[in-house]
Image: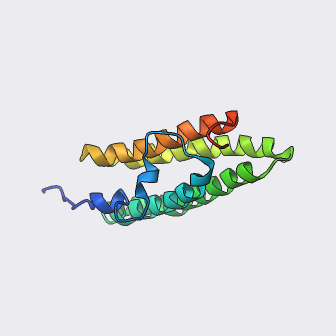
Amino acid sequence: MHPKFYEVPVHRLMCRDVRMHQILTEPRPLHFKEMKLFLNLLAEVVDRWYQAVSPMNPEIASSQESHETLVRELRSSYLKVMEDDTEEVFMERERLDYLFHRFGEMLQSFASVFASPFELITFYRDILRRLEMTHDIMLEGKHGW
């Protein structure tokens, strides 16, 4: 029996048809003003990944809802940290740190599904790298944070 091969819609997976898609992977921390757009695009990245990969492996689809929930919670937590200046923000930062690490694991799993093209694999890693840079500087209050 021969393995099945699926055409991978690389352009679509990388959101190249979405306005401002470059914000996902630029090699610098996000500015405060860019964060909401970035977080909205993360939901699109997850949705497109599942649209492409689920037909290849139906078992993968079982994680879609939990991953979509993770992205919504991550977005909500970042927004709370961005807007809250009360003592409660310290508890939210702990929650954000936990969500951030879970999100990183999810993106790494997304990248690991593909053996090629390298450009697609690095796309998911670059999103994570951008969020890591931002996560680090936002706690220091740099770049508009």
Kindly identify the residue that appears in the image at 41 percent across and 57 percent down.
Answer: 21
Q: Is residue 18 visible?
A: yes
Q: Quadrant of the C terminus?
A: top right
**In the image, is residue 113 above or below residue 16?**
above
Residue 138 placement, left or right of 46? right
User: Where is residue 82 shown, x and y percent of the image?
Assistant: 71, 50
The one of 132 and 105 positioned closer to us in this rendering: 132
The one of 89 and 53 positioned closer to us in this rendering: 89
Q: Residue furthest left?
A: 1
Kindly identify the residue that appears in the image at 86 percent across and 47 percent down.
Answer: 86
Q: Residue furthest front?
A: 144
Residue 37 placement, left or right of 6? right
How many tags in the picture?
0
Q: Is residue 114 visible?
A: no
Kindly identify the residue that appears in the image at 42 percent across and 42 percent down.
Answer: 126
User: Where is residue 49 shown, x and y percent of the image?
Assistant: 39, 59
Q: Quadrant of the N terminus?
A: bottom left
Kindly identify the residue that appears in the image at 41 percent across and 62 percent down.
Answer: 50
**In the image, is residue 90 above or below residue 52?**
above
